[in-house]
Amino acid sequence: MVGARQERPRVRSPYKPGDRVCVVRAGRLHEYRAGDRGTVLSRSHRSDNGSGACYIVSMDGAGDGIPAVFYEDEIEPEERPH
């Protein structure tokens, strides 16, 4: 159908607000290193670079209080000690 809007399939987000995450690779954001931890505040739109969704994360110990934005492939769930 000409001019019809094609619907994109909804992709399930692996993280939701309140989830604890850990940085797995650094480089784009020089102030954070692999192993740094934080709490997901919200999910942003899908990124244009193919890295999946972006997540706004409140990082532990961030003195300025400004949240960081990470691509989905830059964070993973925080492992809780047993």
Image (cartoon, grey):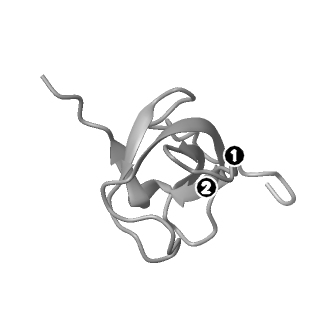
Picture quadrant of residue 48: bottom right
Residue holding disc 1: 7
Residue at point 61%, 56% (across, down): 69
Looking at the image, residue 2 sits to the left or right of residue 34; the answer is right
Q: Earlier in the sequence, mark 2 or mark 1?
A: 1
Q: List the single residue furthest toward the top.
A: 82
Given residues 53 and 67, the one toward you in this image is 67
* Residue 38 rendering spot, x and y as whole percentages: 47, 42
Amino acid at circle 2: Ala
* Residue 33 rendering spot, x and y as whole percentages: 38, 65
Q: Residues within 10 Å of mark 2 (few under 14, many from 20)?
A: some
Q: Residues within 10 Å of mark 1 (few under 14, many from 20)?
A: few
Residue holding disc 2: 68
Q: List the single residue furthest toward the front.
A: 63
Residue at point 12%, 22% (across, down): 82
- What is the CA distance from the residue labelled 2 to the residue labelled 1? 30 Å
Secondary element at tag 2: strand
Looking at the image, residue 38 sits to the left or right of residue 3; the answer is left
* Residue 35 rendering spot, x and y as whole percentages: 30, 55
Given residues 59 and 61, the one toward you in this image is 61
In this view, 65 is above or below 26: above
In this view, 50 is above or below 18: below
Q: Nearer the viewer, mark 2 or mark 1?
A: 2
Given residues 56 and 43, the one toward you in this image is 56
Residue at point 68%, 53% (across, down): 64
In this view, 38 is above or below 52: above
Q: List the single residue furthest toward the left.
A: 82
Amino acid at circle 1: Glu
Q: In which quarter of the image is the N terminus?
A: bottom right
Query: Looking at the rendered structure, which numbered label has been put on residue 62?
Result: none
In this view, 48 is above or below 64: below
* Residue 57 rendering spot, x and y as whole percentages: 57, 45
